[in-house]
Amino acid sequence: MSEKKPVNPIKYFLSGGFGGVCTVVAGHPLDTIKVRLQTMPRPAPGETPAYTGTWDCAKKTVKREGFLGLYKGMGAPIAGVAPIFAISFMGFGVGKRLQMSSPDDKLTLTQLFLAGAFSGIFTTSIMAPGERIKCLLQIQQGGTAPPKYAGPVDAIKQLYKEGGIRSIYKGTFATMLRDVPASGMYFMTYELVQKLLTQNSESGQIGILSTIFAGGSAGIANWIVAMPADVLKSRLQTAPEGSFPNGIRDVFKVLMKEEGPVALYKGVVPVMLRAFPANAACFIGFELCMKFLDFLAPNY
């Protein structure tokens, strides 16, 4: 992603959107498992939990709902992910450009982090409602009872009927609390790892293997930072109305009281299993699209 040409936010926008679609297709099954582990009811004394872990959750989901059960709720992120990633990458491009006086400037790690964090602010307005709908659809378990929501559109209609636009945007602050620092870590890590790998290569050019490793590493770094806020966000967005009147603060208090600090990393296994391939796919899509756009418009 480091180039001597001027940073073009439009190219970042288009390439980021394509990379985002690649991310969802590669990572959604493990995202479904993550949400189900994060939101499963706490077992009563003497009862076994609904899922004992990542593999158990995957087996039970496929057994009850078929393989496509792992792709439940994908409509919302597919519809929203292209603009979300497009805006995120464009925000990163703008953040870089604001800190550069010429195309030859080399940004520090702190500057790259700030540019990435800047992109996290851009995406929250789209990300928050998409996350709310996705999580509500993902926690619907297969069984004899019909699901509450028939799909993303039905979920939007019901949420709006129950609480208006405020209900659809429930968890916005929690989403921002997750995405601003995590996005900073995400883009900073990608640029750092790419720089280290290309410096040690014979050609000095960005290649497929360096992109896979740098993109996967960026995804892991992102989720190490994002995980605690993501758990709080998922609990808040899937709770019945009125459960947490003070929002994320109440979720945190209840979680600490009932389950302790370890609960902040609930679902970490599927997250980390998903993070590497999904984000490697994202940056491969991004870099390929950037090369294609550079070929079409080499002077911009």
Image: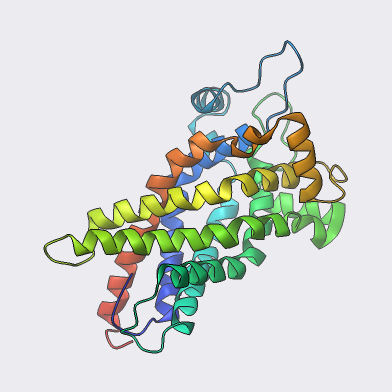
Q: Quadrant of residue 287?
A: bottom left
Check the image and tell me how it is coloured. rainbow
Q: Residue at x 38, y 81 (%)?
A: 7
Asked whether, in this view, residue 69 is left or right of residue 155, the answer is left
Task: State the image coordinates of residue 65 (x, y, percent, origin top left).
Answer: 57, 28
> Measured along the vertical axis of the image, is residue 273 above or below residue 176?
above
Q: Does the rendering let one see residue 150?
A: no
> Measured along the vertical axis of the image, is residue 32 above or below residue 77?
above
Q: Nearer the viewer, residue 294 or 69?
A: 294
Asked whether, in this view, residue 18 is left or right of residue 250, the answer is left
Q: Does the rendering let one see residue 88?
A: yes
> Measured along the vertical axis of the image, is residue 254 above or below residue 77?
above
Task: State the image coordinates of residue 273 (x, y, percent, origin top left).
Answer: 43, 38
Q: Residue at x 32, y 72 (%)?
A: 2
> Measured along the vertical axis of the image, is residue 271 above or below residue 258?
below
Q: Nearer the viewer, residue 127 or 97?
A: 97
Q: Nearer the viewer, residue 54 or 288?
A: 54
Q: Residue at x 42, y 74 (%)?
A: 12
State the quadrant of the C terminus. Answer: bottom left
Q: Quadrant of residue 44?
A: top right
Task: State the image coordinates of residue 136 (x, y, percent, origin top left).
Answer: 69, 43
